């Protein structure tokens, strides 16, 4: 047994090698690099689509206070078409990046089918992405109203948008519009960025007020879940008996990550990681030598 890892192994489970441990650690690091790359790609995509919406809306001579996407029927239809394009392209990007390259041939179809079921509010991935895109569109609507109110032309508005999508409601332009005392039609200017749960109609809890941030976080979390599920499917193919969870960072997480560390998880439990957004825990699979695991309940504080 490698000296830096101490495990209480159930009967019938082989001890992992140093190579097993190194590979397990590298996998979560590789996943983290993929998350960062995807987050950057999504952010670039959102900037591109914000620019498209700004260009469309600046074609219509609508005063800042009167501006909203619904102020002109033709403009609204153009915006809907852009948001449909964003949905399709974003889902395609998440799908493409959510299966490790070396696992696509074997488990790609299964992971993509599983991926489609992920979402918030007990909804699927497409619904969740549409929901966050809707929140993003409200931000862009407020941005355009504020840029018009500031007297910016289309190019200045576009350039400014690229740096404030994640901080919109603290930007000088939006703050000036909100504090002007004038009546605006753009929902984000009226609410100061507060958005409401589609079912309770109360202010959203646990989400950023910025739609761009929600979309980037969702993409990263979806990729992380899919990578861990892909690894789990491969471990099942290889006859692994179960796995252990180890902390991959020093960030305090006593109520979530720490509770999963240090005990044997049989394969029948499924994959528990990632345990939360930005979770860096790594998983070490261990193999059964005869297919029978006899004492894992004694090593798991939550199994009765």
Image (spheres, rainbow, N blue to C red):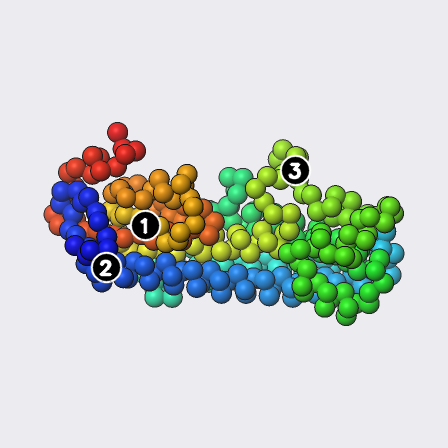
Q: Of the two numbered discs 2 and 3 on the same chain, state the one appearing first in sequence.
A: 2
Q: Quadrant of the N terminus?
A: bottom left
Judged from the image, the secondary structure of the residue bearing numbered disc 1 is strand
**N-term mark: 1 or 2:** 2
Q: Quadrant of residue 104?
A: bottom left
- Residue located at (34% from left, 66% from top): 102
Image-quadrant location for residue 85 = bottom right
| Residue at the image point whose x is 84% and y is 57% from the top | 149
Image quadrant in which the C terminus is located: top left
The residue furthest top is 304
- On the picture, is 281 further left or further right than 166? left
Q: Residues within 10 Å of mark 3 (few under 14, many from 20)?
A: few
Residue labelled with disc 2:
20
Q: Residue at 22% of width from left, 38% of height from top?
A: 299
The image position of residue 198, as x and y in percent, is 63, 39
In the rendered structure, the answer to whether residue 110 lies left or right of residue 286 reads right
Viewer-side residue, 8 vs 162: 8
Residue nearest the observer in this picture, 299 or 136: 299
Query: What number is the disc on residue 246?
Result: 1
Residue plotted at (42% across, 44% down): 253
- In this rendered view, identify the residue nearer to me: 251 or 112: 251
Image quadrant in which you'd find residue 33: bottom left
Q: CA distance from mark 1 to mark 3?
A: 36 Å
Instruction: Kindly tell me whether residue 92 is visible in this rendering.
Output: no
Disc 2 to disc 3, how far (Cα)?
46 Å
Q: Determine the residue located farthest toward the bottom in the rendered image.
A: 155
Labels in figure, total: 3
Reading the chain from its start, which is encountered first: label 1 or label 3?
Answer: 3
Instruction: Please give the label number shown on residue 203.
Output: 3
Residue 86: x and y in percent read: 61, 59
- Describe the element under mark 2 as helix, strand or loop: helix
60 displayed left or right of 41: right
């Amino acid at each position: 047994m490698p000296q830096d890892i101490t495990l209480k192994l159930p009967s019938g489970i082989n001890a992992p090698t140093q190579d097993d441990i190194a590979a397990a650690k590298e996998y979560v690091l590789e996943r983290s690099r993929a998350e960062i790359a995807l987050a950057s790609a999504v952010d670039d995509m959102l900037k591109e689509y914000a620019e498209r919406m700004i260009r469309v809306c600046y074609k219509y001579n609508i005063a800042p206070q009167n501006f909203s996407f619904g102020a002109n029927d033709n403009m609204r239809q153009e915006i809907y078409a852009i948001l449909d394009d964003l949905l399709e392209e974003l889902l395609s990007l998440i799908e493409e990046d959510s299966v490790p390259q070396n696992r696509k041939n074997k488990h790609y179809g299964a992971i993509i089918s599983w991926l489609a079921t992920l979402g918030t509010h007990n909804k699927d991935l497409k619904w969740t992405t549409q929901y966050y895109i809707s929140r993003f569109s409200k931000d862009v609507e407020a941005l355009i109203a504020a840029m018009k109110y500031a007297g910016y032309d289309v190019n200045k508005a576009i350039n400014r948008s690229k740096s404030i999508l994640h901080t919109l409601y603290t930007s000088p332009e939006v703050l000036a519009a909100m504090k002007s005392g004038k009546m605006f039609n753009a929902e984000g200017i009226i609410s100061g960025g507060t958005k409401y749960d589609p079912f309770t109609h109360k202010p959203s809890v646990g989400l950023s007020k910025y739609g761009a941030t929600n979309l980037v976080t969702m993409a990263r979390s979806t990729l992380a879940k899919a990578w861990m599920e892909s690894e789990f499917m491969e471990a099942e193919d290889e006859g692994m008996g179960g796995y252990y969870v180890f902390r991959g960072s020093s960030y305090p997480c006593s109520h979530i990550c720490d509770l999963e560390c240090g005990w044997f998880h049989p394969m029948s439990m499924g994959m528990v990681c990632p345990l939360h957004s930005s979770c860096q825990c790594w998983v070490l699979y261990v193999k059964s030598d005869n297919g029978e695991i006899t004492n894992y309940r004694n090593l798991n504080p939550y199994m009765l």
